[in-house]
Image (cartoon, rainbow, N blue to C red):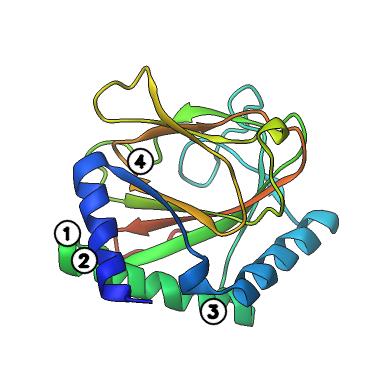
Amino acid sequence: MDVARWLDDLADGLSEHGWMSFDMTPWLGSQLLQSLQQEIIVLDQSDALKAAGIGRGSAPVRDRSVRRDKIAWLQGATPAQLALFECLEDLRVGLNQRLFLGLKRVEAHYATYHSGDFYTAHVDSFQGRASRIVSFVLYLNDDWQPGDGGALQIYGRTNNNASDAVILPEMGRVVLFMSEEIRHGVLEAHRTRYSLACWFRQDEIPFLL
């Protein structure tokens, strides 16, 4: 795999459209994807994921009319998580070299949507906060079909009321987008949906988990 050319294509896509969707399998490898999938399945089955909130700070609001997923933050505590963070570090450096974004660190969590769960359209960061700059979502679902729901709906830069794309959460599929610009939402899932969300940030102070 020509990583430099791949990074060039990602940078071009972010610059032109504000988002990109691509298959991450050639970079991460099937074994790492399967390890990450197994981790989130175990966390889900052991009730280790917690209901996600909206807003930042120490007391996010839990509003089931807005989002219904459950999450668990990654701490680099397993070989699979460490391998993922190594790949994300390469991506951080590559994006900085090409787009001069000043990305300093990454945070990540697993997310599970059970049947009936969704997340209404939103942006990941408010304009001018200089915190979350680039969002990265990796999907960990085998044999996902359109009838399973749970697709990611992307709203483009030119018309925030019309979606640019609807992306199925298929194994190894990644969506990369500018956190302050691109509205997106998760349509209602009809089976359990697994994903991993990451944010490349400009601030240096780690988010307190």
- Label 1 to label 3, Cα distance in Å? 25 Å
Identity of the amino acid at label 2?
Asn
Q: Secondary structure at mark 1?
A: helix
Position in image of residue 184 (x %, y %): 44, 33
- Label 4 to label 1, Cα distance in Å? 19 Å
- Label 1 to label 2, Cα distance in Å? 5 Å
Q: Earlier in the sequence, mark 4 or mark 1?
A: 1
Residue appearing at x 29%, y 21% in the figure = 159
Q: Which residue is mark 3?
A: 82
Mark carried by residue 192: none
Mark carried by residue 99: 1
Please state, as top left, top right, bottom left or bottom right, where the N terminus lies in the image. bottom left
Please state, as top left, top right, bottom left or bottom right, where the C terminus lies in the image. bottom right
Q: Is residue 40 left or right of residue 96?
A: right
Q: Earlier in the sequence, mark 2 or mark 4?
A: 2
Q: Is residue 51 left or right of residue 95?
A: right
Quadrant assignment, res 68:
top right
Position in image of residue 115 (x %, y %): 77, 34
Identity of the amino acid at label 1?
Leu
**Residues marked 1 and 3 touching at CB (< 8 Å):** no
Identity of the amino acid at label 4?
Ser
Residue appearing at x 75%, y 32% in the figure = 190
Q: Secondary structure at mark 3?
A: helix
Q: Which residue is mark 2?
A: 96
Mark 1 neighbour density, 10 Å: few (under 14) some (14–19) many (20 or more):
some
- Label 2 to label 3, Cα distance in Å? 21 Å
Q: Which residue is mark 4?
A: 125
Identity of the amino acid at label 3?
Leu
> Image height check: is 203 above or below 65?
below
Quadrant assignment, res 100:
bottom left
Which of discs 3 and 4 lies nearer the camera? The answer is 3
